[in-house]
């Protein structure tokens, strides 16, 4: 990016932060008691508030099925989503504009083609979904549950927005555009070794240290390991230390909160 557009961007950002900063009581109300943010210091919390302010300016958060979305609810989503960006460029959330909130789990119908070419229609209840270049869809019930009741490896907002980081380069394959200085080869090596090991365990019917859902695809593996990185880093370290190390270099955040 050239320096003029950089300057313009910083100027726009400052204007947003000055004019539309999230009011302090609302920020307090939404983030107090948010288990995920325990351990962030005052400077990090202030930066997170700026990112969340930018997020609410750049993205629409709309309720469906009669769900009325308050500012506190929007901040609850934005604060968790922006935790991923605390030390990443905001460009990582480019190419999409909307978050859709359902009151609870939502039913979707997906068509899948099997090996013989037949198309099957599958109905399932989801807590979240992220479309490549499209919206992030979340169940408000689950967003709320995950942010106040910290469970190892479970946070629907982190999961769905990790898919956004991954899809930033146009494909959800478990490898987001990496930072300068990070090696794509070593990322691919570490992630595929851990992914293959997990798949083998799942296929053998063995117990796994992390949610076996991670073995669904490389994209799900990245999203699920991101959930562990922020909610239960020690579990991730025990399960796949090299993946933990890659995520530490990528997110540049302390693993232990
Ligand atoms: Zn997913």
Image (spheres, helix red, strand yellow):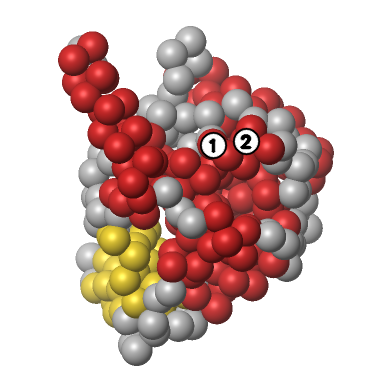
Q: x, y (%) of residue 33? A: 72, 62
Q: Viewed as shown, does residue 122 lie left or right of 118?
A: right
Could you tell me residue 243's position as x and y percent? 64, 32
Q: Are marks 2 and 1 in contact (CB under 8 Å)?
A: yes
Q: Where is the C terminus found, in terms of image quarters?
A: top right
Is any part of residue 246 visible from this angle? Answer: no
| Quarter of the image that includes the N terminus | top left
Q: Residue at x 44, y 24 (%)?
A: 178
Is 143 positioned to the left or the right of 147 in the image? left
Out of 22 and 65, give the one closest to the viewer.
22
Residue at 39%, 82% in the rendered image: 68
Residue at label 1?
47
- Name the secondary structure under disc 1: helix
Compared to residue 117, the image places residue 47 above or below, namely above
Residue 176 falls in which quadrant of the image?
A: top left
Helix, strand or loop under label 2 = helix
Query: Which label belongs to residue 44?
Result: 2
Q: Residue at x 62, y 35 (%)?
A: 44
The single residue placed furthest to the front in the displayed view is 19
Identify the residue at horizontal 44%, vertical 68% (top origin).
71
Where's residue 254, x and y in %?
71, 31
């Amino acid at each position: 990016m050239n320096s003029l557009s950089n300057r313009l961007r910083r100027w726009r950002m400052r204007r947003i932060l000055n004019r539309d900063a999230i009011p302090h009581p609302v920020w307090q109300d939404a983030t107090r008691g948010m288990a995920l943010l325990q351990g962030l210091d005052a400077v990090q919390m202030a930066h997170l508030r700026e990112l969340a302010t930018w997020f609410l300016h750049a993205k629409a958060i709309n309720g469906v099925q009669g769900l009325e979305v308050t500012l506190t609810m929007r901040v609850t989503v934005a604060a968790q989503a922006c935790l991923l960006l605390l030390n990443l460029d905001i460009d990582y959330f480019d190419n999409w504009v909307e978050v859709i909130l359902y009151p609870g789990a939502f039913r979707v119908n997906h068509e899948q083609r099997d090996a013989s070419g037949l198309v099957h229609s599958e109905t399932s209840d989801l807590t979240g979904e992220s479309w490549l270049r499209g919206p992030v869809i979340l169940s408000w019930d689950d967003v709320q549950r995950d942010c106040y009741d910290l469970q190892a490896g479970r946070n629907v907002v982190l999961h769905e927005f990790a898919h956004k980081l991954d899809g930033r380069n146009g494909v959800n394959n478990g490898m987001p555009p990496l930072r300068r200085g990070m090696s794509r080869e070593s990322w691919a090596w570490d992630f595929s070794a851990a992914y293959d090991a997990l798949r083998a365990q799942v296929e053998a019917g063995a117990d796994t240290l992390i949610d076996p859902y991670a073995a669904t695809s490389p994209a799900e593996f990245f999203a699920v390991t991101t959930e562990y990185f922020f909610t239960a880093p020690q579990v991730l370290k025990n399960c796949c230390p090299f993946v933990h190390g890659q995520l530490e270099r990528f997110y540049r955040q302390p693993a232990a909160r």
